[in-house]
Image (tube, rainbow, N blue to C red):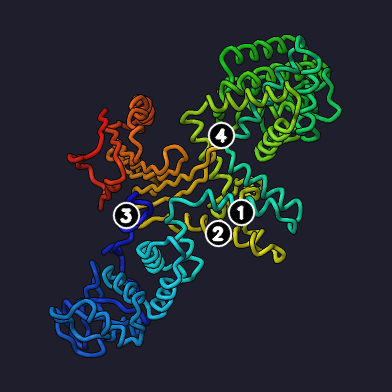
């Protein structure tokens, strides 16, 4: 493996401060610069990297000489003190370094020289205090951390004016890692499971969220179990014992009331409050029940509009529902006819969404609702939030998994198999969104959104970790595990960011698919348009994957003017025949988004991940390895 960190793209972003931005200096900082012009009153133009500044010098100097300078004042103008004499061509870098360290009374340790050398080469000003702190960090690097990664993290802290603290440094180091997120999550989960000091409610909420992240398809499995259970309950020809077992499972999971029977399990249950808008199918039924007879005409129009726009229903199901609505319009509106109509609509929608769940397992409507959300709203109208729906489905899987009844075991086996057979691009997108949303990495930004679901945000993992770390009673072991997990999340945020038109996004996602765990890390680098939106025509995306079967894999996707080139790095030669039949699907999927697939290359890790200094539209002419051109 030759590339497991994000340094190539990070260097591209932060190697130098753009020349159109002023160089911001602080008192005490040191840097290497060259005198380019002299002005009266000991004023001079100093070249620092690709930037120039006008400063007042404490002593007269000669144009063309290079020196190490220290900022002695910034107001009303920048004042520079010469730390070393002019650098002769015969002076070695080590001699220059020692001269600077002596003049600043700094130790000549290997670590100090490494730090100073890095910042001088990068032409980035750094203060004496920062040098001392950086040396201490270099001496105490954790096992497995490369010095180059540590130096890159320090450089980013200085350039972006981040607090020069250990918390930020450790977070940036974590943000550069492409492995370890899964093990960090597992360690926290195991310590949380055996903890006996936390309040039961706090522990339960944390465990539920950890479980939701670890098993992103569990709610979909629960949706299939729900659909199959409802089908059994609706099948009057099914054995009574099977129907009772299905009903008891739904009762135990909290999906239907405890007093539900085989005769009334799907009866209309009016709620005390009228729904504010008709989005979920259950709100449709509640609206019908709450409508006054004189407002029936307006209700009919709302029902027709909802039916037409519902993309989770087939045309045949929409037609059946429309026919039901038309029959109601032939009746004189009254409280009694509205109640009968509500019951008929509920039965029709329960049947429709029960059929829709397995057919549209990872599909959502325009309101971001799935078929299982609609079905749950019909069976349990008081459950209004998606967070509650997810919890119900996970609880249903838990109850079903613990059941010893043959019919329930059969339902669980069928549901698991169906989820596995439904794996496609929508499923993977769903998994990534579920995990990232569950982690709540950027929940602070979501709080600024006035329409944000605060209850959903509060259930995310990161805000719960914040609250956990404020608990004085937490055990040292659990606190350390929580801090490590928090550091990984903060590292993603700190490693992401923008620099002018360039933008970088880092996401580390712990994934578990059917018992197989893997670390998936995504690094996106692109540019922003003048209107502040992402330019979808140009980008580079790196996927770092740690998988049980394929082991370490890096996918480098480059987008130039909507033309996509994909390079897969993996040591296993069996990847080549596996990739061949997937080319057509990849090409078709990209074409749907108005992208053109240029080529797919598969290479071993001996050929390092290519690094480009700038985004360019020039075609790549030379390649090695096995090439698949489309």
Q: How many numbered discs?
A: 4
- Give the image location of residue 404, x and y in percent: 75, 28
Image quadrant in which the C terminus is located: top left
In the shown orientation, is residue 190 left or right of residue 557?
right
- Place residue 107 in its image quadrant: bottom left
Q: Is residue 283 visible?
A: no
Position in image of residue 476 (x %, y %): 65, 64
Mark closest to the chain's N terminus, 4 or 1:
1
Q: Say whether marks 1 and 2 touch (CB < 8 Å).
A: yes
Q: Of the residues under marks 1 and 2, which one precedes in the sequence?
A: 1
Task: Indicate the position of residue 257 as horizontal and vertical percent values.
Answer: 82, 30
Q: CA distance from mark 4 to mark 1?
A: 21 Å
Q: Which residue is mark 2?
A: 484
Query: Farthest residue in the bottom direction?
Result: 59
Residue shown at 47% from the left, 70% from the top: 163
Whether tag 4 and tag 1 are in contact, CB under 8 A, the answer is no
* Residues at discs 1 and 3 in contact (Cβ within 8 Å): no
Residue with the mark numbered 1: 188
Q: Nearer the viewer, residue 332 or 192?
A: 192
């Amino acid at each position: 493996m030759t590339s497991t960190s994000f340094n190539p793209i990070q260097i591209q972003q932060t190697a130098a401060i753009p020349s159109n931005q002023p160089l911001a200096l602080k008192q005490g900082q040191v840097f290497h610069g060259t005198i380019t012009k002299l002005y009266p009153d000991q004023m001079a133009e100093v070249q620092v990297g690709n930037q120039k500044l006008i400063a007042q010098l404490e002593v007269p100097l000669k144009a063309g000489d290079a020196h190490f300078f220290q900022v002695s004042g910034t107001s009303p103008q920048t004042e520079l003190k010469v730390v070393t004499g002019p650098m002769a061509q015969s002076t070695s870098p080590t001699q220059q370094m020692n001269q600077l360290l002596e003049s600043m009374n700094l130790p000549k340790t290997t670590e100090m020289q490494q730090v100073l050398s890095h910042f001088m080469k990068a032409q980035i000003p750094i203060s004496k205090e920062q040098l001392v702190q950086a040396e201490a960090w270099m001496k105490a690097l954790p096992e497995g951390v490369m010095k180059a990664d540590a130096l890159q993290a320090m450089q980013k802290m200085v350039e972006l004016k981040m607090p020069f603290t250990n918390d930020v440094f450790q977070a940036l180091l974590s943000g550069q890692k492409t492995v370890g997120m899964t093990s960090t999550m597992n360690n926290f989960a195991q310590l949380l499971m055996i903890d006996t000091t936390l309040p039961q409610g706090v522990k339960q909420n944390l465990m539920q969220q950890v479980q939701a992240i670890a098993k992103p398809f569990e709610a979909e499995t629960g949706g299939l179990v729900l659909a199959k259970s409802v089908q059994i309950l609706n099948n009057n020809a099914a054995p009574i014992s099977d129907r009772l077992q299905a009903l008891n499972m739904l009762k135990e999971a909290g999906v239907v009331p405890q007093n539900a029977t085989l005769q009334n399990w799907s009866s209309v249950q009016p709620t005390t409050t009228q729904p504010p808008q008709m989005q979920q199918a259950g709100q449709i039924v509640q609206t019908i029940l709450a409508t006054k007879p004189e407002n029936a005409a307006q209700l009919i129009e709302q029902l027709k509009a909802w039916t037409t726009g519902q993309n989770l229903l087939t045309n045949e199901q929409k037609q059946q529902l429309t026919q039901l609505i038309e029959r109601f319009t032939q009746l004189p509106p009254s409280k009694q006819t509205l109640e009968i109509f509500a019951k008929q609509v509920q039965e029709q929608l329960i049947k429709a969404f029960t059929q829709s769940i397995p057919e549209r397992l990872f599909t959502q409507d325009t309101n971001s609702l799935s078929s299982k959300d609609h079905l749950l709203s019909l069976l349990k109208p008081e459950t209004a939030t998606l967070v509650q729906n997810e919890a119900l489905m996970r609880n249903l899987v838990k109850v079903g998994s613990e059941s010893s009844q043959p019919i329930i075991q059969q339902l669980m086996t069928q549901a698991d198999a169906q989820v596995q057979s439904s794996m496609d691009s929508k499923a993977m997108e769903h998994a990534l969104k579920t995990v990232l949303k569950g982690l709540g990495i950027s929940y602070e930004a979501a709080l600024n959104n006035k329409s944000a679901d605060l209850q959903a945000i509060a259930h995310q993992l990161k805000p719960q970790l914040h609250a956990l770390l404020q608990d004085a009673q937490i055990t040292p072991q659990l606190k350390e595990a929580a801090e490590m997990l928090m550091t990984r999340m903060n590292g993603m945020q700190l490693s992401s960011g923008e620099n002018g038109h360039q933008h970088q996004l880092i996401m580390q996602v712990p994934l578990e698919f059917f018992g197989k765990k893997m670390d998936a890390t995504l690094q996106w680098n692109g540019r922003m348009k003048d209107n502040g939106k992402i330019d979808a025509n140009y980008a580079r995306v790196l996927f770092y994957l740690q998988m049980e079967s394929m082991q370490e894999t890096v996918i480098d996707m480059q987008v130039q003017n909507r033309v996509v080139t994909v390079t897969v790095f993996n040591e296993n030669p069996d990847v080549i025949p596996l990739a061949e039949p997937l080319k057509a699907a990849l090409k078709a999927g990209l074409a749907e988004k108005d992208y053109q697939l240029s080529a797919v290359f598969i290479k071993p890790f001996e050929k390092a991940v290519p690094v480009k200094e700038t985004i360019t539209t020039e075609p790549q002419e030379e390649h090695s390895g096995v090439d698949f051109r489309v």
